[in-house]
Image: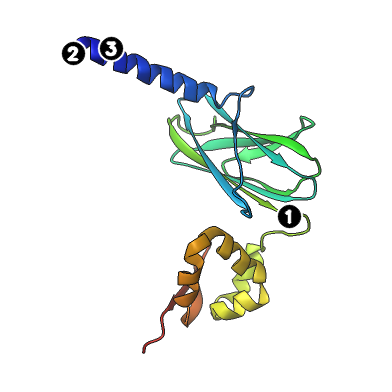
Amino acid sequence: MRLNRLIALILAICTASICALAQTKNAPRRITFARGATVARATGYLRGAHDEAWFALRLSAGQHIRVEINARGATRGVLVFPSGKQDGQPGGVIFDDNIDETGDYKIRVTESSMADAWRGSFTVSVEALPRGQTSPDTSDLERYVGKYPSELFHNVPAVKTRLRQLLGANYAAFNERMQVETPIEKDNDTLIMRGCLAHS
């Protein structure tokens, strides 16, 4: 029984070591986009203030890239361009701009040295839009507060396109449930849309 526990412990340690090595600078975890998708996600785990996780993805010059890190603790992220130049900031959204190089980009995730130490999992979300296309400016969307979602969808088709990409097969159900709409509301930095099926 003790031997079985020892073997299980060794396997767990080896697995953890392999997972850690799979996200180092020289062996980053590759982020890939499903066919037709503009958003991809990957997860990682930080084990302390000196730990770091690396990811890689192929991008093209002219694309609009948005990189966001979500975790229960404070993080810092850096986007490393193929040429080696870097851009980043504390987690949340660490990059949201057009890129000017084609090749393999790397994302480095660490704990923030300006906050309390923690350990745990995190998620990296990358939105990569085609050349010339950008995400809608949230400040522009605020002018639709008090108006109906259908007006927003009509005037800013990029919102509907993004919803379709994010919801995938569930988009049809979402669209069906927006037959009866209520005016758009704002809760802090969040816009809220409500809708339901029409009564028969």
Q: Which of marks 2 and 1 is nearer the N terminus?
A: 2
Please name the residue shown 45% across and 25% down the image: 47
Give the CA separation, mark 3 to mark 1. Answer: 51 Å
Give residue 2's quadrant in the image.
top left
* SS at mark 1 in the image: loop
Residue 139 drawn at (x, y percent) = 64, 65
Q: Which residue bears the numbered disc 3? A: 6
Residue 6 drawn at (x, y percent) = 28, 12
Q: Is residue 37 above or below residue 90?
A: below
Q: What residue type is labelled 2?
A: Met
Residue 17 drawn at (x, y percent) = 46, 19
In this orientation, does residue 15 appear? yes
Q: Which residue bears the numbered disc 1? A: 130
Q: Which residue bears the numbered disc 2? A: 1
Q: Residue furthest top?
A: 3
Q: Can you say which quadrant of the picture contains the N terminus?
A: top left
